[in-house]
Image (cartoon, coloured by chain):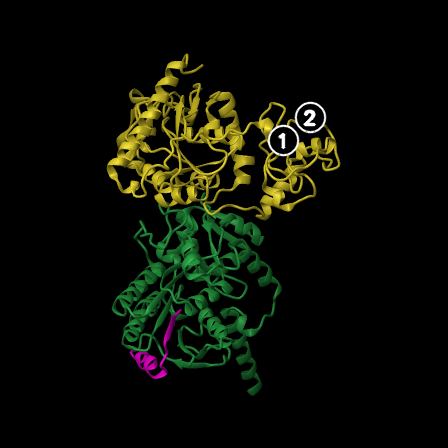
Amino acid sequence: MAGRRVLITGVSRFLGLRLAKRLEQDDDVELVVGVDLEDPPLPIKKLEFVRVDIRNPLIARVLETTKVDTLIHTNIASTPGRLGGRSQMKENNVIGTMQLFAAAQRAERIQRVVMKSSTAVYGSGPREPSLLPEDHAARQVDLSGYGKDCAEAEQYARDFGRRRPDVDLVVLRTQNVVGPTVSTNMTGYLSLPVIPTSLGFDPRLQFLHEQDAVEALYTALKGDVGGIYNIAADGIVYLSQAIRQMGSIELPILAPAAHTAANLLRRFGVVDFPTDQLKLLLFGRVVSTRRAKEHLGFTPMFTTAETLQDFRDRRQHDTLPEPNLRPTWERELFEYLKQRNQQRQTV
Amino acid sequence: MADAEIIRLDSRTRAGRTGPSRAQARVRCRATTSTGRPCRNYATAGTGYCAVHARAQSAHPAQGSPAGQAPVHVGEAPSGPVAPSRQHPGVEEFVRRRLAGDYEVDDFGYDPELARQVLLPLAGPLYERYFRVKTLGVERIPNTGPALLVGNHSGTVAIDAVMVQYAVATEHPNERAIRNIGADLVYQLPFIGAMARKTGNAVATDEDAEELLRRGELVGVYPEGYKGVGKGWRERYKLQRFGRGGFMETALRSRVPIIPVAVVGAEEAFPMIANAKWLARILGFPYFPITPTFPLLGPLGLLPLPSKWLIEFGDPIPMDDYPDDAADDAMLVFDLADRVRDTIQQMLYRNLQKRKGAFF
């Protein structure tokens, strides 16, 4: 019997890359097609890399010619970062997803689709239930930025699911991914030596360990159930508690000033914490993971507290991890320095 | 009617102290204080007793038996090998752990250590000395397992909920924590919102109430909501409409008993003689109270009047005998909600008649 043929979007980003790496060892998988705009930073067996923008109708040709049966969509970015601005980010997230699903609808061979969304679709607010279940319709509908992108992308996924009832569609709403090697706005925020918080507010935070995030995608890929699932670690930490565990200093500032502070931090490139996610730092966001445990069969290895511990301990001690495991900015810096060196030698 | 099982203090089994166990780090102290009340301090790691009683215990060691709580009165002997030389040896360790973030909170944000050791004791003087709260029927609350406590809400600020919490946390044989579900307004406010979370409260939604009950917690609801706390002096002790019966649906769906709670005294603590509606609208509050002392005396007016309180817990009303789809039968839900409301109203009238005056 022929093995499965998997296409991963966003294969040069953290989760896509790790998932491709994970599939190396899986004998059921015959071929991994990776799609992204930049080359994957390390070689992966079985990987056939295609440099194509998912917004480009060419993606339909790729789906057709590679004869993939499984589509893994991990290409929804949480920060403008390298995409260059919020409007580009929205183009990539929403229009990209729209195009991708339009192409997938035509691809007859597709049997299973897994999309990585985010718990940001729930927003954050004082009225929300303490443990958000999947079918909760946010009372706070004023989503913006990343959360809105994810919600709209999910809408395209649902439309696709309706038009192709023969395909199993899985949407994973992942919590803030934290871990020793991943670089997200949450890890950047928690790495600050002095962490600005909002005076009088102490949000409950829930994380997802990077290994668990990859494992959840893998479980969704291998399983045979569809549906929407919250993916998060068990337990919570308070922001104040997390800051103490990190050994950092908390700097409470008045809520109206927080916006300005976040903008300043971003302008100086210290940490890219989007202002649309500031509400998270006021009210927090914790999701219920019962459905993922019972139906998807996914139980995370790390609790929120353990995730934070692992992040704190390994981030500090592994000063030089494998190049591919380094955070992006570090990798970019190294590459830049290498280039400079070569230039100097040639001169 | 399934009466709650009562376990008397003196019949409880003695706890195992054999061998230090880190897992017991968060357990409450097993001793009773000299006043006969269970000790509220948390046990230090491995001993099963708080720092004070650990010394007493090591002076009078007793045989261990497995699991559970076991306060038997212990003389507070002055010295022992466990105790460091300081006067309050637990404090240092407590502060160190808090500063390192080395404590656990549950999914709803309940921080038992902070609540029990720091925040709850702050309410102590108010409960014992100021309002001189008398509690009736606290043993009707089951020792374990879920129940829905339904109370009357009064007194302008929701201090009655705190007093009920304190009553059950100190006077119930198992010193259970009540997990109130509170209006979202609470969680919008700085400091108060965070405090409410840490003392074990959750948001007034079906999801929160049902999840807490599923986990076997005691959930406290005040279905009158703002209409209860924000009602005028003339309507004191008259129960307002019980919301839309959401608490009843929750109880039916979760099949947990309802325990009616009647609080007498809170109305006199903050008698609201008028409601400055226009000011409330400007500030975005559901009401703006004018009491004899507030805002006349400024912040001092926030001090409650020293009324004498009485909190009664009624017999549990079981929910097991209704059909599976009972929660969807709107008429049944309203009917049952009305009956609960009547029960609490009767308890209120009875206790009002019994008391000699509002302030003694």
Label disc, if present, on residue A112 of the rendered structure: none
Between residue B227 and residue B251, name the one nearer to us: B251
Between residue A22 and residue B346, name the one nearer to us: B346
The chain whose colour is yellow is B
Q: Is residue A61 magenta?
A: yes
The chain whose colour is green is A
Residue beneath disc 1: B31
Pinpoint residue A238: horizontal percent, then vertical percent.
49, 48
The answer to whether residue A145 is visible is yes
User: Which amino acid, mark 2?
Assistant: Gly
Judging from the image, what secondary structure is the residue with disc 2 in?
A: loop
Quadrant in the picture for the C terminus of chain A: bottom right
Label disc, if present, on residue B75 of the rendered structure: 2
Q: CA distance from mark 1 to mark 2?
A: 10 Å
Quadrant in the picture for the N terminus of chain A: bottom left
Judging from the image, what secondary structure is the residue with disc 1 in?
A: loop
**On the picture, is A302 further left or further right than B186?**
right
Quadrant of residue A201 within the rendered picture: top left
Q: Give the residues in magenta.
A: A57-74
